Amino acid sequence: MTDITLLDGGMGQELLARAGDRPTPLWATRVMMDHPGLVRDIHADYFAAGATIATTNSYAIHHDRLIAAGVDHLFHALHLRALAQAVEARDAHGSGRVAGALGPLVASYRPDLTQPLAEAAAKYAENSALMAPHVDLFLIETASSVLQAEGALAGVVKGKPVWLSISVDDTDGRKLRSGEPVTDVARLVRDYAPEAVLVNCSVPEAMAAAMDVLRDFGVPFGAYANGFTHITDNFKADQPTVDDLFRRHDLTPEKYADFAMGWVAQGATILGGCCEVGPAHIRHLKDRLVAEGHRIV
């Protein structure tokens, strides 16, 4: 029997699906502005499905994104809204932890836009200081290059556990999206001591190769894959919307759980889902883990 931490699934795509709104470059942040209660409802559904961690809807709340949309004056308020809805859902559920999400600056999947270390660190310090009083841990997500990951690790405020999650090439999980080998992340584990290292927002087929690398880092590891067919070139343009990403139709809850159980067999102890992996996937994964003798913690 293994103790497994079960993360939630994707927030942004689930918000869009429930709201029925046209996607904008602000993505999940825009939906939270227009439909304040939906974030809390989705957190509640993930807890009911068996997740033990709520990941705050703060992934894309960065000055660069808000300035482009003319709403940077809402930077603090949006963080507090995202935090409050996760905390409220956790408290109503009666158990669980809240992970403060720290997504990439400027854009996802764009290692070419990685900012200088000191500049990035200062921005992550501001975001994480806002979140620190309300979260149990920080989750750095979708880091697509070593420098992108290091900027977040260098800036996140001290005093709470930090988990680092990288994003790997969809065709070769041994490489970051930048093309750098995942083995290069070992230096960051040594220098910054994150308490866990994960892989997220890549296709599930890429995760096994990444797990083979992460298990040599000496810290707990795991994965939460997405349900996209791939990351399109159009989505890598400036100010994209998720209209340029396509959900795959074969990734049923049963198939996703098959992938995840393979990661467990490789030693992964932290599992969940990313974009297009919803509450039904998490519920089935929980049931599968319990049926095979694992304990959800």
Image (cartoon, rainbow, N blue to C red):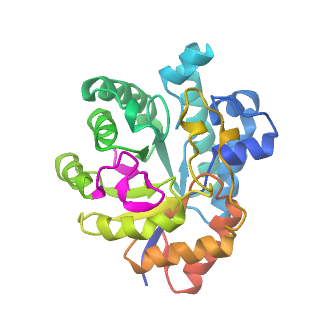
Residue 264 picture location, percent across and down: 44, 76
Residue 64: image x %, image y %?
49, 21
- Name which quarter of the figure residue 22 lies in: top right
Q: Nearer the viewer, residue 20 or 297?
A: 20
Is the N terminus in the top left, top right, bottom left or bottom right quadrant?
A: bottom left
Along the horizontal axis of the image, is 124 left or right of 61? Answer: left
Lateral position of residue 208 relative to residue 244, left or right: left
Q: Residue 167: say if magenta.
A: yes
Res. 66 image quadrant: top right
Can you say whether 240 is above or below 76 in the image? below
Q: Residue at x 23, y 51 (%)?
A: 193
Magenta residues, as a range? Answer: 158-182
The residue drawn where x is 64% and y is 36% is 28
How many dots with numbers? 0
- Judge from the rendering whether residue 145 lies leftward or rightward of residue 244; answer left or right: left
Say above or below: 110 vs 9.
Answer: above
Q: Position of residue 206 (x, y in %)?
A: 46, 64
Q: Quadrant of residue 138?
A: top left
Task: Between residue 151 and residue 156, name the one nearer to us.
Answer: 151
Instruction: Find the residue positioned furthest to the right.
Output: 20
In the rendered image of this protein, does residue 231 appear above or below residue 68? below
x 36%, y 32%: residue: 114
Q: Is residue 122 visible?
A: yes
Vertical order, 282 against 27 (above or below):
below
Q: Is residue 6 in view from this perspective?
A: no
**Is residue 140 part of the magenta span, yes or no?**
no
Counting from the top left corner in percent of width and height, residue 158 is at 28, 38
